[in-house]
Image (tube, helix red, strand yellow):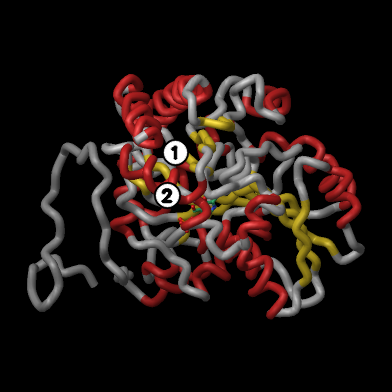
Amino acid sequence: MRNDKGTLLRPDPLPDSASYPVVTPLSPSVVYGSDTPDMLDQQYDGDLHGYTYSREGHPNADVVAKRVDRLEGAPHLGVVTGSGMAAVSAVLLGLTRPGDHIIGSNQLYGRTMRLMNDDLPRLGMHTSLVDVGNVDAVRDALRPETNMIIVEVVSNPTLRVADMDGLAQLAREKNVTLVVDNTFTTPRSYQPFAHGADIVIHSLTKLLSGHSDAMLGYVAARDADVLDRLRVFSVTTGLTPSPFDCWMTERGMLSFDLRFDRAQSSAKMLADFLAEQSGVTRVIYPGRDDHPDHKRAKDLLGDQFCNMVSFEIEGGRAAANAFSRGATGLAFAPTLGDVGTTVSHPASSSHRALTEDQRAALGMSEGFFRISVGLENPDELCAAFARGLAALKD
Ligand code: PLP
């Protein structure tokens, strides 16, 4: 019963207003009251739309889901989760059972890799990690019990581009679920559903939210039953997001297109700038002609090559430290997609668990850095990198 008379320990109803807020209201309520048990029954049966308990869903999550759905062309209302990893976990743990075999890219995000290497095998699932730039390698890894392939379009941090068309064709042919983590590429650059994916995942924490102040994930599925299983698993295991993070993310998403376009045009400029600097031994940017997957990147992404650039300097850890100290103004932080440029050093962060030889096999030395280009003035950005490179000569 609503507190129409403003009594007892319940908030007063919101004042009537003929006008409406232009900003989505934040709804922190964990529980929602229904007028009668009949109404609650109808809500649980899905005959009446209404929220009950925020772990099961809340307005701010649905507002974000709808917005990402639109960008991704998702066929049903997606599930918003408390982090990108919650979305990955919902897929890998909520849709598989002991005996299943799952193929993943050998360059997945580190925590996804951990699920593939440690948690899934502990629970009786089998996994294989392969080069998803090579469809024949994926075909060779298939087993009769393979039911899922999980990939990122552009790998982190070596920025290799998966053979998405080949993978989609193979997945269709073998009736295997194709899962695409679209965090790096974002729907502005690549829309997995339009290219044959069955499930799309996001860490909204990154470019879509864009300000490093909200942690959120998203998962959508082509098939309504699969999506329902993901939603039930996520509610049961408590992967639900906080309304505040959803509210912040919605606000961030309002400027997503503009941020993305600015960041990627600066990324191209920065990549070209770095390629001309002495002391830089390698620049990796899918939009450059010298990138090993440039043609595939162009075919898949058009001219939207995203905001990530990697580069390498000589001189091992000492040079990496000198560069980091010298490049004042840049944040050395293991994240991406922020309004400000962030530079990460995989050998001391995301890939620290690997041996030097394992990192070398992936093409990452101690002098390897990954840049997530932000919205700074591009000239000032290049100047910050120049300061770091100048420090190598000191
Ligand atoms: N997927 C990719 C490609 C990522 O880069 C990340 C995080 O960096 C995640 C998933 C996990 O997202 P979150 O940090 O929001 O859990």
Quarter in which the N terminus is drawn: bottom left
Nearer the observer, 366 or 90: 366
Side of 36 where 127 appears, left or right: right
Question: Does residue 184 appear in this view?
Answer: yes
Residue at 80% from the left image edge and 70% from the top image edge: 100
The residue depicted at 15 percent of the width and 72 percent of the height is 10
Query: Looking at the image, is mark 1 or mark 2 earlier in the sequence?
Result: 2
Residue 366 in percent (x, y) is at 53, 49
Which residue is under mark 2? Answer: 335
In the image, residue 103 above or below residue 284: below
- Quarter of the picture containing the C terminus is top left
Residue depicted at x 55% and y 25%:
304
Cβ–Cβ under 8 Å for marks 1 and 2: yes
> Does residue 370 lie above or below 299 as drawn?
below
Which mark, residue 9? none
- Which residue is nearer to you in this view: 190 or 135? 135
Residue on which disc 1 sits: 372
Q: Secondary structure at mark 2?
A: loop
Count neighbours of disc 1 (C-alpha within 10 A) and say few if under 14, some if 14 to 19, many if 20 or more. Answer: many
Callout 1 secondary element:
strand
**Place of residue 126 in the rendered image (x, y in percent of width and height, measured from the top left):** 78, 70
Q: Is residue 250 above or below residue 79?
A: above
Q: Is residue 204 visible?
A: no
Q: Type of residue at label 1? A: Ser
Residue 104 vs residue 60, the one in the foreground: 104
Asked whether mark 2 and ligand 1 are closer than 8 Å, the reply comes as yes
Residue 226 percent across, percent down from the top left: 67, 59
Name which residue lies at 33% across and 55% down: 245
Inspect the image, locate mark 2, and give the three-letter code of the amino acid beneath it. Answer: Thr
